[in-house]
Image (cartoon, rainbow, N blue to C red):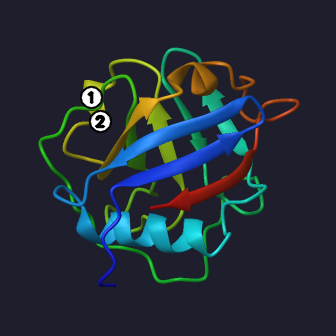
């Protein structure tokens, strides 16, 4: 993918969350997120796992946390970038090369994840909207992504 994107706008019920993309850290993961976002893949997808003080996870079209897109899994692009408040990183199975479409956004310091998950962005505006997502695994009435577009 030759397009270069610098931001991702995630529209939630409460408004827009702006994410600064980090192709310098994870070019393949940024390209995947941007491609899926611009294809409408994330529109209507819920945050199926929201743990207070830890993170909000979404990106599974079934809302179960067990599925991804029909695209092949990505090879890890681990970096030294810390998992801190606002960090956007890819979810995966125990296999480090299994990231696909699911991602999480850290509520707080989660440095124990450093070097084990691929960081692809950081929330630059609207973190209060992520903080306000309904909590649970899964939440009784999960928050959802109205739309998501890369630019």
- Asked if one can make out residue 51 in the rendered structure from this viewpoint, the answer is no
**Residue ranking furthest to the front:** 151
Above-or-below relation of 61 to 45: below
At 46% from the left and 58% from the top, the residue drawn is 93
- Residue 147 is situated, as x and y percent measured from the top left of the image, at 70, 54
* Element under disc 1: helix
Q: Secondary structure at mark 2?
A: helix
**Is residue 65 rendered to the left or right of residue 77?**
right
For disc 1, the neighbor class at 10 Å (few under 14, some 14 to 19, many from 20) is few
Which label number is shown at residue 24?
A: none
Pick the residue in front: 105 or 99: 105
Q: Residue furthest right?
A: 141
Dot 2, how many residues are within 10 Å of its Cα: few (below 14), some (14-19), or many (20+)? few
Residue 129 or residue 75, whichever sits in front: 129
Q: Which residue is the site of mark 2?
A: 113
Up the image or down, 83 lies above or below 64; here it is above
Q: Position of residue 102 (x, y in %)?
A: 54, 56
| Residue 64 in view of the camera | yes
Q: Quadrant of residue 129?
A: top right
Label 2 – label 1 distance at C-alpha: 4 Å
Residue identified by numbered label 1: 112
Decide: marks 2, 1 in contact (CB < 8 A)? Answer: yes
Residue appearing at x 40%, y 56% in the figure: 94
Looking at the image, the residue that sits furthest to the left is 80
- Seen in the picture, residue 61 relative to 71 is either above or below; the reply is above
125 vs 140, nearest the viewer: 125
Q: Quadrant of residue 32?
A: bottom left
Report the label total.
Answer: 2
Q: Residue at x 19, y 44 (%)?
A: 115
Q: Position of residue 139 (x, y in %)?
A: 79, 30
Residue 141: percent from left, percent from top:
87, 32
């Amino acid at each position: 993918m030759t397009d270069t994107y610098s931001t991702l706008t995630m529209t939630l019920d409460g408004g827009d969350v702006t994410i600064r993309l980090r192709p310098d850290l994870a070019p393949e993961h940024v390209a995947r997120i941007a491609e899926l976002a611009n294809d409408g893949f994330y529109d209507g997808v819920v945050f199926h796992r929201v743990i207070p003080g830890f993170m909000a996870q979404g990106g599974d079209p079934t809302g179960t946390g067990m599925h991804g897109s029909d695209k092949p899994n990505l090879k890890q692009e681990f970096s030294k970038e810390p998992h801190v408040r606002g960090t956007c990183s890819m979810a995966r199975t125990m296999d480090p090369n299994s990231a696909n479409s699911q991602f999480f956004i850290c509520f707080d310091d989660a440095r124990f994840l450093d070097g084990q998950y691929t960081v692809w962005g950081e929330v630059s505006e609207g973190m209060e909207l992520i903080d306000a997502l309904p909590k649970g695994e899964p939440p009784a009435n999960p928050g959802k992504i109205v739309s998501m577009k890369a630019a």
